[in-house]
Amino acid sequence: MHMNPCLMVDAYKLGHYFMQPPGVTFVWDGWTARSNRHMPDCPETVNFGYQFTIKRYFVDFFNRWFFGEDINALEADFIKKVNNGFNPRYSDFARFRELYDLGYLPICIMGLPEGMTVPVRVPLYVIYNTDERFSWLPQYLEDLWSCHNWHPSTSATVAYDRRKILQHYVNLTCDDTTITKNLAGDFSFRGLTGVETAYISTCGHLLSFAKTATFDCYGLLQEFYSATDEDLSGIGTPSLEHSVVCQGIAYYLNILKSNGEYKGITLDKFSEWDEKLVAEMCYLKWLITELQPDGALSYVSDTFDFWGVCTKVLPELREDILAREGVLLIRPDSGDPIKICCGDAGAQTWHERQGAIRVIEHYFGSTLNSKGFKVISPKIRVIYGDAIDRQRNVAIPQGLYELKYSVENIVFGIGSLSYQWVTRDNRGYALKVTDCIMDGVEIPLYKSPKTDDGTKASQRGCFAVHYDEDGRITYTDGLTFKEAIGFKGNLMREVFRDGVMKNLEDFATIRNRLWGGEF
């Protein structure tokens, strides 16, 4: 799809150049996560994803699709679309020709280091023009900036919050308190709004965890964050889904119904079982003894009868499972996750009252760790990834804690419910003009609606972000441009100026910043 960079804006911005007062030569825009109203348990935002956006769009995209294009073709396209779809009085293309002749984006972007956790209402980035002729440009780029930047930080913040939740229960119930990064994988790819969105969102997940099914985020991290093979080793786990299991069951059912057998398994031998369950046992036995007799393998177990798998198939395959050099992960994918994992005291059957963890422990045994919590055989675990929201990510470990089971007995999946069911408003992101120079006079600007609760109020004038006397991140506004740039202890640094990126960092550095080197 051919995209005209001059039109990558909300339509109303097409008129702002003409509406801007004459004599404005400088504009300072601040990007801030203004609120955690929709994420009240996350008072801090994880700063992430901007290096990707800047290189992908402000460098590569503009160099290819604007500065590398035929300017006459861009102009013809712009005028036609503005005349037909907006208003002809705003179709003057002269400012874009001037920008094209300059050959680069005359802006400076300053921001906080990625991987830093930042309190709500503290600015994360600032954009300002470096050439007096282009004071219209910072706000013209707002939509492109906002469109690509709110989601990566929001995903990184969600993952950071989930890891802190799990770390709490790891500290309470596990001997090895370093395992937390392996307790939650990302399964959001198919639920997100595009490949690029999914990849950068997953990278936010990988700031806090080591596992994802969004596999070629590898490529994005290598290209934009200089990730090494060591950074990305072992991020995926071989896993089954229903489409494959259904075929496997059908295959073995056909063999069994033709008076066949698989390694001694026949329908007659298990005549009291549902025949599909017998076929499923054949298929699982083949998986763990022939296809993958070692390593981690995740098996979705509710295609027909989850509790049948747990109480019939797994006990029959117990010796095969214990003989493997690896762990078999049993994955429920339907029902109430809390009840499935921890049990339902009001249920009629034994297995439903016990829940998956205790049922599996019944057949495979457990040991007691030094903290007094049960740890099931390391050859088998439960993985639950269906609709695990924050509340369930707390309730299930809490339920296991109350039952005296270690949280290491289960692995969680974080999917699109968590990484896609969010908006820009989850963190209240906005890019707002707070300073300008007009007719040679610097004027601090601000927004403070009387009808608002304070969430939409902006900074005033230029600002600097710094540590306060207690070591907390805060900001000082009401500054002039020179005061902000020269502010002692300012944590903001240039990351882009006049078409060139600066202060690039690799993924390991960013992740270590978030976790203090203890990822």
Image: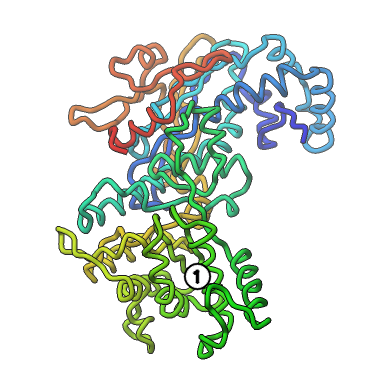
Nearest the viewer among 337 and 90 is 337
Dot 1 falls on a residue whose secondary structure is: loop
Q: Residue at x 32, y 28 (%)?
A: 475
Position of the N terminus, as image quadrant, is top right
Nearest the viewer among 328 and 501 is 328
Q: Residue at x 49, y 34 (%)?
A: 49
Image location of residue 304, percent across then percent down: 55, 77
Image location of residue 70, percent across then percent down: 81, 18
Q: How many numbered badges does the structure rendering display?
A: 1
Nearest the viewer among 395 and 369 is 369
Q: Residue furthest front?
A: 264
What type is the residue that disc 1 sits on?
Answer: Ser
Q: Is residue 165 above or below residue 119?
A: below
Residue 400 in sight here: yes
Image location of residue 99, percent across then percent down: 68, 14
Q: Is residue 495 above or below residue 210?
A: above
Q: Residue at x 39, y 47 (%)?
A: 36
Position of the C terminus, as image quadrant, is top left
Image-based side of 41 in relation to 132, left or right: left
Q: Which residue is mark 1?
A: 301
Image location of residue 37, percent across then percent down: 40, 51
Residue 451 in sight here: no
Q: Residue at x 62, y 43 (%)?
A: 195
Q: Is residue 190 above or below residue 257?
A: above
In this picture the colour scheme is rainbow
* Image quadrant where residue 231 sits: top left
Image-based side of 176 in relation to 331, left or right: left
